[in-house]
Image (cartoon, rainbow, N blue to C red):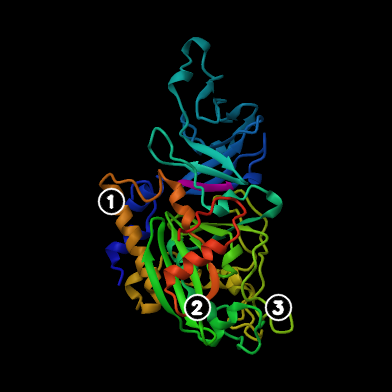
């Protein structure tokens, strides 16, 4: 059981919390590149409990600053994006993308002290459609993440989107490393006879109670859920947790399943979900034996218009205020249409931060309990000065690939995983193929 004290460490992400300090050692996805327009309006961002603004200057350089002007703390959200920086509209002080004060027009020239004033600015990097932010204290930032999904450079082959979720990052993330809910929440109304016989996912309907292997890894944790398949084979669903808040889910053909999802804490009660995947992935079970979409198995999101408030980005039209547009007369198991929306509804229903002392975990939750333990270990070790896993060596994470597959029931799970890795497509070149 997760104790109240452990839960406090796991779920709190502010600047002075153990988990918040540990997460700040990593590069964090802050926004999609297209959200920041050159010379355009500032955008309010919430990251790890901090109120920030993002903007892109006229030269195209992205910036992330504390929203408070260091003069009198008026919000730079109301600033003017002018040429090489942002100008506070209160007194006209101007700051460049690094936070350096360039002008103090309300101060006589001989009294100006621009060289002594800096807006709090975080280091920013941009790659493959994502604006990354380093919020740590190190003088030299670590390398950017380089696991395969975030290395998809061709925009035409990349599926990339965000969704805001109104709950703590941990309960959102844990939905992605909980394989047995697939057979209920998403496919509970589907019988094995209805399912597409070409999809391996049908085995998750024949046997809805898998067994598990779970292991610590250099990048975090992984599980291999397994079920008997045909007479001489085993059906596997493999997924991963990657520090500090990434998941690689199992729902798709392992050999081309290039995907990663970040559960970025905005604050303790809000999470921004970043999804990146290869468009040439073979999806998991979505269709029936006649090629028609299974009940509730839609993919895609319908958004409310973005607004400029702190929580105004990437909100779904179906939400807690309208019961996620649930229709109990529909043929889907939950009455909620859409795989992501089903997950959203259930994880948000737990409350802003789940009371972990109320839980009764089973062996089917072994991946969840193991991942919590790894997070706690890393956060506590970071408090003692240890660098969290993979920060300085992000190539460590390149050994992770998730998905489903069949293997001979005569071989062990790690051998089966290695065999699939060697047979996998490697479109980015970033996948570290397992050795013989």
Write down the region rendered in magenta: 27-31
Residue drawn where x is 54% and y is 25% of the image: 93
Q: Rate crowding at label 1 as few (under 14), some (14 to 19) or many (20 or more) other CA atoms within 10 Å.
A: some
Q: Secondary structure at mark 3?
A: loop
Cα gap from disc 3 to disc 1, whole angstroms: 47 Å
Q: Is residue 419 part of the magenta span, yes or no? A: no
Cα gap from disc 2 to disc 3, whole angstroms: 30 Å
Q: Position of residue 25 (x, y in %)?
A: 40, 45
Q: Rate crowding at label 2 as few (under 14), some (14 to 19) or many (20 or more) other CA atoms within 10 Å.
A: some
Q: Nearer the viewer, residue 168 or 433?
A: 433
**In the displayed structure, would residue 214 be above or below residue 34?**
below
Residue drawn where x is 66% and y is 68% of the image: 299
Which numbered dot is residue 293?
3
Cα gap from disc 1 to disc 2, whole angstroms: 40 Å
Precedes in sequence: disc 2 or disc 3: 3
In the image: residue 113, left or right of residue 405: left
Precedes in sequence: disc 1 or disc 2: 1
Q: Which residue is mark 1?
A: 381
Residue drawn where x is 52% and y is 11% of the image: 109
Q: Position of residue 153 (x, y in %)?
A: 64, 47
**In the displayed structure, would residue 41 be above or below residue 19?**
above
Q: Which residue is mark 2?
A: 408
Q: Nearer the viewer, residue 92 or 221?
A: 221
Residue 278's quadrant in the figure? bottom right
Locate the N terminus by quadrant.
bottom left
**In the displayed structure, would residue 108 be above or below residue 204?**
above
């Amino acid at each position: 059981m997760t104790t109240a004290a452990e839960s406090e460490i796991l779920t709190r992400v502010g600047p002075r919390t153990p988990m918040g300090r540990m997460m700040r050692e990593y590069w964090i996805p802050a926004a999609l590149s297209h959200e920041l327009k050159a010379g355009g309006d500032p955008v309010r961002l919430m990251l790890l409990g901090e109120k920030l603004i993002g903007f892109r200057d006229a030269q195209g350089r992205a910036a992330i600053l504390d929203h408070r002007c260091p003069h009198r703390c008026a919000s730079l959200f109301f600033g003017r994006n002018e040429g090489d920086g942002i100008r506070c509209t209160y007194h006209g002080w101007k700051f460049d993308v690094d936070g350096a004060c360039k002008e103090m027009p309300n101060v006589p020239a001989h009294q100006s002290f621009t060289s002594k004033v800096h807006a709090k600015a975080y280091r920013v990097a941009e790659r493959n459609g994502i604006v990354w932010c380093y919020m740590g204290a190190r003088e030299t930032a670590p390398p950017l993440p380089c696991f395969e999904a975030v290395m998809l450079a061709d925009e035409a082959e990349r599926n990339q989107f965000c969704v805001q979720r109104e709950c703590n990052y941990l309960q959102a993330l844990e939905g992605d490393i909980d394989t047995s809910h697939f057979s209920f929440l998403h496919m509970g109304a589907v019988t094995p006879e209805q399912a597409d016989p070409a999809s391996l996912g049908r085995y998750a309907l024949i046997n809805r109670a898998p067994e598990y292997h779970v292991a610590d890894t250099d990048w975090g944790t992984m599980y291999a859920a397994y079920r008997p398949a045909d007479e001489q084979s085993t059906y596997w669903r493999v997924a991963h947790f990657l520090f500090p808040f990434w998941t690689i889910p199992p729902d798709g053909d392992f050999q081309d399943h290039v995907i990663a999802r970040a559960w970025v804490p905005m604050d303790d009660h809000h999470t921004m979900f970043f999804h990146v995947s290869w468009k040439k992935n073979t999806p998991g079970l979505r269709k029936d034996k006649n090629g028609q979409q299974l009940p509730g198995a839609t993919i895609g999101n319908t958004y409310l218009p973005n607004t400029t408030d702190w929580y105004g980005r990437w909100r779904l039209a179906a939400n807690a205020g309208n019961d996620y547009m649930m229709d109990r007369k529909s043929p889907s198991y939950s009455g909620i249409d859409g795989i992501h929306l089903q997950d959203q509804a259930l994880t948000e229903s737990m409350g802003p931060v789940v009371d972990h002392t109320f839980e009764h975990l089973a062996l089917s939750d072994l991946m969840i309990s193991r991942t919590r333990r790894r997070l706690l270990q890393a956060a506590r070790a970071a408090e003692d000065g240890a660098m969290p896993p993979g920060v300085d060596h992000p190539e460590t994470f390149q050994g992770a690939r998730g998905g489903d597959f069949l293997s001979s029931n005569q071989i062990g799970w790690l051998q089966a995983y290695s065999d699939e890795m060697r047979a996998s497509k490697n479109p980015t070149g970033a996948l570290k193929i397992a050795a013989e």
